[in-house]
Amino acid sequence: MSLAQRIEEQTPATRDRYLDLLRVASILLVVLGHWLVRVFTAENGEVAEGYLLEAVPVTQWATLLFNVMPIFFLVGGALNAPSWRRAREEGEPAADWLRRRSRRLLRPLLPLLALWLAIGAVLGATAGEDAMVLDPDSALTPVWFLAAYLLVTALTPVTLRLHEWAGGLWLIAACAVVAVGVDVLRFGPLADWVTILGQPAVGAVNYLPVYVLLHQLGYLWADDRLPDSPRQQLAIGLTGAVALVVMIGPGPYPLTMVPIAGTDLPNNLNPPSAALVALGLCQLSVALLARDRVTAWLQDRRLWTAVALPGGRLMTIYLWHQTAMLVVANATILTGVWPLPERVDGRWWTTRPLWLLLCAAVLGGLVALVGRFEAPPPPRPTGLAPRPAAALAGLGVALSAGGVGWLVVAGVSDPAMPLRLPLPALVPLAVGLGALGVVGDRLTAAGSR
């Protein structure tokens, strides 16, 4: 039996293949974007590391295509809603459901942390922080997403109940009002008050209303309440596009939808702004317009196999793609094998296909090596102590998200701590992962229902 046949037989008839495609395509676009924006040039015989969005500002327009976090959170809502409803109907406690979802989301982080904490400690102890062409902290840049997605997923039992109780639209409207209000402060009187990583701290409030709003749109998808008329679907996209034009044109919003590494320039992703919601409407419109035709295409075994294979290791791909790029950069640039131009020019662009191919090959090897951490959990043995109550699971979410956030800010090495480990981030993260059963427990093998 061929691989395509086995995957076809293992795919439930009720599975929405189109949602899987949207998940896979969005993450692969993020990976591609991150691999493209790093720039290495030769200045006065020395290797210089830069960022394409700063070196060639016109490329900031491309972030309107490459920032696909809105559609990923929307798809998350479309998948989490039926998953929690089934669990609720079967009598599964919210804490157990959350722990199952958290384990699949967070376990791929464990080997990544182990590797880079060890590398950070060794480089720090040997005074070798500058021995790499990229800061080791860049390997952990993608983990910010885990904190945001974990918080939004943890709120699913509450937000879905509100959605069912009041029809869903009022919570979406409330989140939009809060998001715009936060942006008024962020780009106005509080722009320079308190900053985190160079960005106004008040903007961090929008991690909840912006991503909860996008997640709520996924509930509408799950309930089949989104427009099915092409004219109405197009109207959604036009609404988002007009909003973006107003926000970025006469409005105070920046053009770039992602941070410009190495600068304190404002952006619409970290922290998220209401412009991300407008972009999400554009992406939703395209997704709805293409749904019927692409869903039919996905009945082809070969095409579905191309989606299902990376889909089973999607979080591993996302978390490890920066590490793959660091491997390629250090193996080719430090050794002098890779020819470096003096600036981003035609020569630089012609080497991009080979650069992407090398990064993809290394990432494939890493996924084969550590992908098992993302596998569905094995059965939980009988006789273990009862799982924690909802309050402890909630504490686990708070500590895990806080630890991940602090790790992104502090980096993989802290000179003031034993072994240079960032203990203020690791201690709450470890406790939170334990409370969620990501470490130290074996959960019910229910997969990602």
Image (cartoon, rainbow, N blue to C red):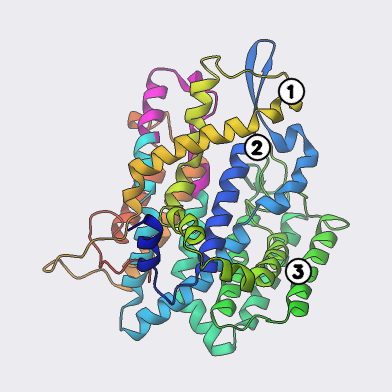
Q: Which mark is residue 37?
A: 2
The secondary structure that most of the magenta stretch takes on is helix
**Image point 55% across, 35% down: which residue?**
357
Side of 238 relative to 115 (left or right) = right
Does residue 137 appear to the left or right of 255 in the view shown?
left
Q: Amino acid at mark 1?
A: Arg
Q: Position of residue 45 (x, y in %)?
A: 65, 10
Residue 2 location, x and y as percent? 36, 56
Q: Earlier in the sequence, mark 2 or mark 1?
A: 2
Q: Nearer the viewer, residue 293 or 394?
A: 293
Q: In screen coordinates, is 325 left or right of 435?
A: right
Residue projecting furthest to the right: 250
Q: Residue at x 40, y 65 (%)?
A: 8
According to the image, label 1 marks what residue?
Answer: 343
Percent x, y for residue 348? 70, 26
State the SS at label 1: loop
* Label 3 to label 1: alpha-carbon separation: 37 Å
Q: Are marks 3 and 2 in contact (CB under 8 Å)?
A: no
SS label for mark 2 = helix
- Mark carried by residue 237: 3
- State the residue at coordinates (71%, 61%): 279
Q: Does residue 402 show up?
A: no
Quarter holding the N terminus?
A: bottom left
Q: Residue 416, located in which quarter of the rendered image?
A: top left
Is-magenta flag for residue 119? yes
